[in-house]
Amino acid sequence: MEHLFIINPAAGKVDRRKELTEKIESVKTDDKVTVMFTEKPGDATEFVKSYLSKADDFVRVYSCGGDGTANEVLKGIIGFENCALGVVPVGSGNDFVRSFEKFTKDDFVNIEAMMFGEDKLIDIMECQGRYSMNNMSVGFDAAVAKNVDKFKRIPLVSGSLAYKISIVYCLLSKRKHRYRMLTDGKEYVGKNIKTLLAVAGNGKFYGGGIKATPLADFNDGKIEFMHIKTINALKFIFLINTYIKGDHIDNPKFPFVKHTKCESVSFESDKDIDIGFDGEIISLKNPTVRIVPNAVRVIVPKVKERVAVGK
């Protein structure tokens, strides 16, 4: 067996190259261990593809960064069967590992626990040749993420402040998105209904801990699709804390929230649609999101006195 660590120094608030490298080197193993550092977007994908194409043994690939880094590594392992993906969450969002609720974030950051952990097959989602382990979203969330960079350019505005400004901006101007939506090819909630946001979930969390799709399951062969109709700003403010906790599903206080299980969900519009893939925003024409069952092996940590089989 081989171990390939992809470390993104730009992930999170501090550069953790030295810390992670020391932890990796401290693990006693006879396996081959390789560490690579990314310098720009796309590096992780290329590093992984190149390494796996030459590997003779089974390779455990570890994404050391945030959800964006994990998505890049995922792109790199697609098409290879001689590998498993481990997510070491040292970024800012780290939402993918939250869905494994029998484990803590520290369990996944424990390098030794990951290197001796077990592989588990999970579903992923695909949309026009792009892939996601966690979620894809349209509407308000995608608009917020898309506008953050614009506000970051303002002098003295930090990343977190830019995100808050973007939320307020989109709350005032980006609450009405009109799509035709189909789940498994059938009309969903009516034609061209005004939409605040919609999330196709394979994992439960996104946006730094928001439990948008609490019924999502990595192993059920289904997308958990959650849709919120356009509502006024006051209702949105009333909803938000409940939404963050994941208590909005089947809640009689919020009849404008709908959800269903499906194998595909399609969005149709006269305009290109901004869709978020684990935080990355891409504009696509009439995207269809599909579930791909048992597509990727992921590593869950081996924790003392616990068997690593949790979700």
Image (cartoon, rainbow, N blue to C red):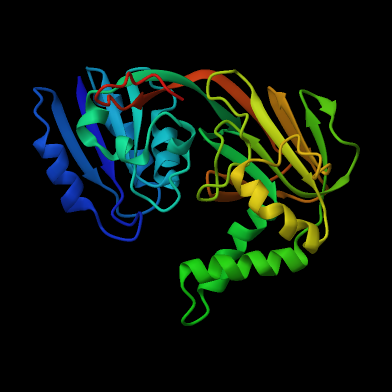
Depth order, front residue of 310/21:
310
Depth order, front residue of 120/32:
120
Q: Relative to 202, is 5 on the left or the right?
A: left
Q: Position of residue 25 (x, y in %)?
A: 10, 38
Residue at horizontal 44 percent and vertical 35 percent from the top: 75
Task: Please tell me whether residue 55 is drawn above or below residue 248 in the rendered image.
Answer: above
Q: Can residue 274 be seen in this view?
A: no
Task: Please tell me whether residue 160 is drawn above or below residue 9 in the rendered image.
Answer: below
Depth order, front residue of 209/84:
209
Which quadrant: the N terminus?
Answer: top left
| Count of marks placed on residues | 0
In which image quadrant can residue 24 be found? top left
Q: Position of residue 296 (x, y in %)?
A: 44, 22
Task: Please tell me whether residue 165 is drawn above or below residue 308 in the rendered image.
Answer: below
Residue at horizontal 83 percent and vertical 60 percent from the top: 232
Residue at horizontal 91 percent and vertical 39 percent from the top: 191
In which image quadrant can residue 238 be found? bottom right
Q: Where is residue 279 in the image (x, y as percent from the top left)?
A: 53, 49
Residue at horizontal 22 percent and vertical 23 percent from the top: 116
Task: Please tell me whether residue 38 is drawn above or below residue 109 in the rendered image.
Answer: below
Residue positioned most to the right: 191
Q: Where is residue 52 in the image (x, y as percent from the top left)?
A: 30, 27
Q: Is residue 133 visible?
A: yes
